[in-house]
Amino acid sequence: MEFPQQQKPAGDGKIVYPPGVKEITDKISNDEVVKRLKMVVKTYMDMDQDSEEEKQQYLGLALHLASEFFLRNPNKDVRLLVACCLADIFRIYAPEAPYTSHDKLKDIFLFITRQLKGLEDTKSPQFNRYFYLLENLAWVKSYNICFELEDCNEIFIQLFKTLFSVINNSHNQKVQMHMMDLMSSIIMEGDGVTQELLDTILINLIPAHKNLNKQAYDLAKTLLKRTVQTIETCIANFFNQVLVMGKSSVSDLSEHVFDLIQELFAIDPMLLTSVMPQLEFKLKVNRGLERLAVVRLLAKLFGAKDSELASQNRPLWQCFLGRFNDIHVPVRLECVKFASHCLMNHPDLARDLTEYLKVRSHDPEEAIRHDVIVTIINAGKKDLNLVNDQLLGFVRERTLDKRVRQTCKRHGHSKESARAFFYC
């Protein structure tokens, strides 16, 4: 929408009301205001963009409905009816808005956003009107006019927060679809997504929030899938600042980056296309605890049952395998534990893992040597075909080690059980 020069009401500037509708002012009761507004709502609902004569005739009324009397009205029913009128006004006058003041447009859209909170109660007698408001805004893409406003981000953040807070399991697919259309058009047709706006989406993926409102999680998930081509760059920028540049202050979600990466990977690996090189960088940092955290994350990503990450990102996979030789004992131990899970879900990676397990079967740390054997035995118990001859050889060799036999006994694996597995 464009911002034309302020149009003046027809004639001498008097506000023209639809037939049968008396003047609406603060001099009448709320009940009477509601009664008259319902007739105005009907008039605007029936108008279309081609109604040039009516558009000019009711322009003064359109401007009047955006006055402080209506936008700050304490009556909930009055506010809802006015919001429905305003939504239709944006539809009728598109692509031009009848309101030229940026401050007024901001007030109007923040006002409309507040009314959308009424979507929460699907059993409310007024729910159909709230649904009409949502449907109209989504169909017309009314919020896109806010791109022209300097502080449009404030409006979008409030809108996203509102929709994520009100969605619940009583909403049907139409409600969800309109919410999705409204938010996705803002993401895909704007100049970019700010960190604050991105946070309103990502926060719904954090386990604590995910468990509180599954519908908000599903909405965020679907939104990310639909907008992946646009939002991927913004996601990469967020993780780059936190993971590579160490700027945790850029977002309140910085402490949840690994949880978020795991969730985003499960939603669509394409969302992390530019993030994977950042994880490769983190695997090589000097601090052992940081490497350990990244190894634990990547173990989940590589080991996931349907994951194709190892084949699609060989450099990252090879870098990860290099952590089997990490100087930090907990990192090597984590890698060995990962191997069992990976062998079960991805037997095609057995050849890559074998060489590294071979080295770790002679690790100076007894706990790691023990876990190599446990890893192989656990995989073989599930399916002997998962264990190649070289891995079986490690078991035979290590069960001859007196210290390993004692360790196996302490952890519930006797020498005999290991050999029984080997010869089965």
Image (cartoon, rainbow, N blue to C red):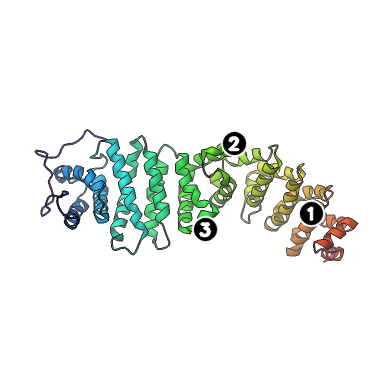
Residue 146's x, y, as percent? 34, 40
Disc 1 element = helix
Q: Which residue is mark 2?
A: 246
Most distant residue in the left direction: 12
Residue sitting nearer the eye, 196 or 4: 196
* Residue occupying image coordinates x 70% and y 41%: 319
As drawn, is 214 to the left or to the right of 105? Answer: right
Q: Earlier in the sequence, mark 2 or mark 3?
A: 3
* Residue occupying image coordinates x 81% and y 63%: 413
The dot on residue 211 is 3
The dot on residue 372 is 1
Residue 286's x, y, as percent? 70, 37
Residue 347's x, y, as percent? 71, 56
Residue at mark 1 to residue at mark 3: CA–CA distance: 36 Å
Amino acid type of the residue that numbered disc 3 sits on in the rendered structure: Asn
Amino acid type of the residue that numbered disc 2 sits on in the rendered structure: Gly
Residue 88's x, y, as percent? 25, 49
As drawn, is 68 to the left or to the right of 307? Answer: left
Foreground mark, 2 or 1, reads: 2
Q: Earlier in the sequence, mark 1 or mark 3?
A: 3
Q: Could you tell me if the residues under marks 2 and 1 are in contact, i.e. CB atoms within 8 Å?
A: no
Q: Earlier in the sequence, mark 2 or mark 1?
A: 2
**1 lies above or below 140:** above
* Residue occupying image coordinates x 59% and y 34%: 245
